[in-house]
Structures are given as structure tokens and as C-alpha cells.
Amino acid sequence: MKIFVCPTCTSRLFFDNMSCSCGVAVAFDPAREGFVTDVAVCPNRTQIACNWVASADGGLCDSCTLTTVLPNLSIAGNRTLWSKAEQAKRRVLAGLRRWGWFGAADDGPRPEFHMLSEATASGPADITMGHASGRVTINLAECDTTERVRRREALGEPYRTMVGHFRHEIAHFLFERLAASDRFKGEFRALFGDETADYGAALMRHYAAGPPAGWEDTCISSYATAHPHEDWAESAAHALHLVDMVDSFAAARLSSDAFSGAGYDAYAEANPAQLLTAAMEIGVALNHVNRALGVSDLYPFVTPARVLEKLAFAQTRLKHGPAT
Ligand SMILES: [Zn+2]
Ligand SMILES: [Zn+2]
Ligand SMILES: [Zn+2]
């Protein structure tokens, strides 16, 4: 993620900012990839702190408009959870837009989001996050930090965030768009296996028996071993994490021997191996920094050669954008 400037005073602005220290109200325009003032703002600005500009006709912004189902907002807490989910979603969509996904020139289908809360008028509901036929279901419960950490611990996962959930589920959606190409499908199957294998049976097997021995050599996470679709979603989510990590690092004017220095645009990097080398170096360095403060590792994953191959494939194919 870039660091932006205030159009009025040129102070630094960060992606989530709604106003500048100079006092001016600002809005983020994803089409221009920068902040603007004196424009129509997203109608959700007041209720969920969406800081994007309105659509051309004054309607919901390019991110909010993709949300088609909301939680019951008369129940205490649901609005806050929804607000946090939309914040994570905007960040993920802005990254994908750097590669052309869901921007003005992309005339392909968009995902739609169902933002569901376990707190409903008829009591607690069971909600499973997932993607099916263009519809992404998000369980807002994990927008509550305590609840997310509790679930992460229960599942024995090293990393669990809303940004991660959005990247994973949108990756399933993007698979469907990419798989319109036979070339993509051929390359995908050579690397990830046959995605037409029975999905329900594979998930049941995964939850009953756990990952196969030695899975760490071939998959980025235990869950990725469940089925080629999950391996893709996990690998693609990590490819998106890592490009944005390197991009943010460079935007903050930190330097690494692994890339060319000031002004480096990780999203424009044509060589996935170069990008992943930079990401691994930065990951190790920032894990070291985090440990100085006694907080969790920034990137608590190891990436053997076979995993890097999958991440490079995902990065390359996603970077081509919708024209693929
Ligand atoms: Zn300013
Ligand atoms: Zn909005
Ligand atoms: Zn999945």
C-alpha cells in the first residue's frame, strides 16, 4: 500500500484516513489512487467510516456497492463489526485494483459480499465463511479481535486476520475468472492438482485426518492441503499479502538489498522470484523487529521451493489482471 499526500497541504495520509492534520476532510478515490477533497463521498461514510468517494451518480463507493447483504443493524455491535469488515475489504480491493481487477476497464463479473453476523434477532446463527458462484460470505464475528484470536488459537493457526479472510475468499472468486482460460487451467493443474476432485469429501477427510505428513514442503498452510481449490486460495492470498507487504515497506521508504530502493513499485515487479526474495527478506527482518517489542511475528510462515513456485504462479497470473 502506498502512503498518500493531502491535496491541500501535502502532509502524509494513510489509506484509512478521513481527515488530514491540516483539518481538511479527505476521501480516497480508487480510480485516481489518491486522496481528494470537495467531492461527493460514499453515503456509508457517516455510519461505517467508509472514506472512499461516491460513485459517479453519487451512490455507494466501488467497495460498498459490492456488499449486497448486511447484518441486522438494530442489534448492538453489528454496525461496528460491519465497519471493520468493510475497512479490510477496501484495502484488499485497492490492492487488486493496482492490477486492474474490478476497475473501470474491467468489464468482467464482480464478487458480491454477504456480511453476516452471528448475532441475529432469532439468536446466535452458524455462519461459514466461503465463496460460491460469485458470492462471498463473511462471518463478521472475527472482526472482534478477542473472538478472532480465540478462533485462531482453537484452530492452531499462526496467522488469522480479516484482510486474510478477504484475500482468501476473493482468490476463490478470481480462480473462476482465471479458469476461463484453458492455459491457466493446464498450468494450475500441473502445480496444484485436479480441482475437479470431490470437494465435500476432501474437506471431510481433512477435518477427520488432518494434513498429510510432510505437508509443510508443499503447502503454505495446513488448510491448503485440503483440496486444490483451498491450496490456490491460500497461495493466492499469500501472494497478495507479500506484494502488499513489500509495497508498504518501500512506500515507508525503508530499504532492502533485495529491491531497487526509493520509488520501488512491488505491484509492477515483473519478476516474481525477485518479489518473493524481497518479501522473505523483509519478513525475516520485521519478525526480528516485532520480537523486540514482544509481539507476534509479522509473517509467521516458511516457504520451501515448492510453495514459492505456487506463490510465484499466483502472483504472475493475478498480476496479468482481468485481460488474462
Ligand atoms: Zn492536509
Ligand atoms: Zn463506501
Ligand atoms: Zn477457501
Image (cartoon, rainbow, N blue to C red):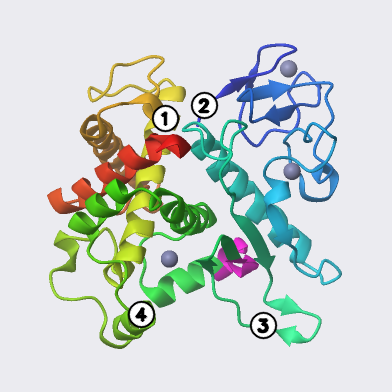
Which of the two discs, 3 and 4, labels the residue nearer the N terminus?
3
**For the residues bearing labels 3 and 4, Cβ distance under 8 angstroms:** no
Instruction: For marks 2 and 3, give the CA distance.
Output: 38 Å
Residue at the spot of label 4: 203
Compared across the picture, whether 256 is left or right of 12 comes to left
Circle number at residue 239: none
Compared across the picture, whether 4 is left or right of 192 comes to right
Instruction: For marks 2 and 1, give the CA distance.
Output: 7 Å
Q: Identify the magenta region.
A: 138-147
| Residue under the image location 53 percent in, 35 percent down | 97
Compared across the picture, whether 310 is left or right of 232 comes to left
Residue 243, percent across and down? 38, 37
Residue at the spot of label 2: 2
Residue at the spot of label 1: 247
Residue at the spot of label 3: 125
Amino acid, disc 2: Lys
Which of the two discs, 3 and 1, labels the residue nearer the N terminus?
3
Question: Between 147 and 240, which is closer to the camera in this rendering?
Answer: 240
